[in-house]
Image (cartoon, rainbow, N blue to C red):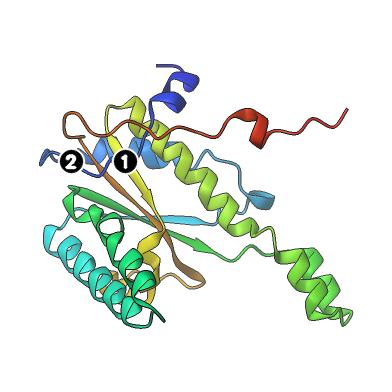
Amino acid sequence: MNVLDAIYARKSVRKFKDDLVPKEDILKMIEAATQAPSPKHQQNWNFVVLTNRDLINQMADIVTKSHERLAELAQNEKDKKIHLSVMKYYTCFKNAPAVIIVYGSEYKMIEYKILQENNASQEVLDLLASPQSAAQGIGAAVENLLLAATELGYGTCYMTGPTHAKVEIEQLIGFDKPGYELMSMVALGVSEENTPPKPARKPLEETVTFMD
């Protein structure tokens, strides 16, 4: 499978078989992830692999309770109903034999330090930080991981929704590396048969602008 084939074959999978994913395959995916570009080559990622069923179930319970608490804050029944209706997408990782928790660290910007030391306004500093370079590095690494998984015959689901419970998840996982926080997770496993197709993408006319 070439790169373009993997790109077009990849889709989000939320139903998995019980088959375990060998450690050596997971390591291949993560090694591919680490080949991604990162801002100033800081490689601001760390991958925590969960295969313990009890831990995965506990994490799903945490996300469920957090989701329900947020629903109670809704100002009207329509918003509450919409929020609760998507819970299954926030907890589908509980069906996966493996979950890769992606942690990231702050992107250290020398230009931010220079401006801060020269009493730049918070507005200027916020504008400089607005591209969220740290998150962009994480996203690039995760995409590499997803494509490697596709190449190896596995299904994945890239998830950021569960991070509304990130503090409790971090406490459950117990990963402690100074400066790192939970950014996202990837559900991983052998796909069930006949999973839904990849949703249609917007036409290029809506997403591309050429400046001649």
Look at the image and tell me in which quarter the N terminus lies: top left
Q: How many marks?
A: 2
Q: Secondary structure at mark 1?
A: strand
Quarter of the view holding residue 70: bottom left
Residue in front for this viewpoint, 189 or 49: 189
Give the residue drawn at x 17%, y 69%: 58
Measured as percent of width and height from the top left, residue 2 is found at 45, 17
- Residue at 70%, 63% in the rendered image: 130
First in residue order: circle 2 vs circle 1: 2
Quarter of the figure that contains the C terminus: top right
Label 1, residues with CA under 10 Å away: few <14, some 14-19, many ≥20: many
Q: Quadrant of residue 196?
A: top left
Work out whether residue 147 or residue 37 is closer to the camera in this orientation and state it.
147
Residue lying farthest top?
Answer: 1
Q: Is residue 98 left or right of residue 5?
A: left
In the image shown, does 194 or 32 lie closer to the viewer? 194
Name which quarter of the figure residue 204 lies in. Answer: top right
Q: Tag 2's secondary structure?
A: loop
How far from the left and from the top, in percent, is residue 4? Answer: 49, 20
The residue tagged 1 is 156
In the rendered image, the vertical position of residue 201 relative to residue 132, given as above or below:
above
Residue denoted by label 2: 16
Indicate which disc residue 107 carries. none
- Hey, what amino acid is under mark 2? Phe
Residue at (67% x, 65% y) in the render: 108
- Indicate the position of residue 50 as horizontal and vertical percent values: 24, 56
107 left or right, relative to 155: right
The location of residue 81, given as percent across then percent down, is 31, 68
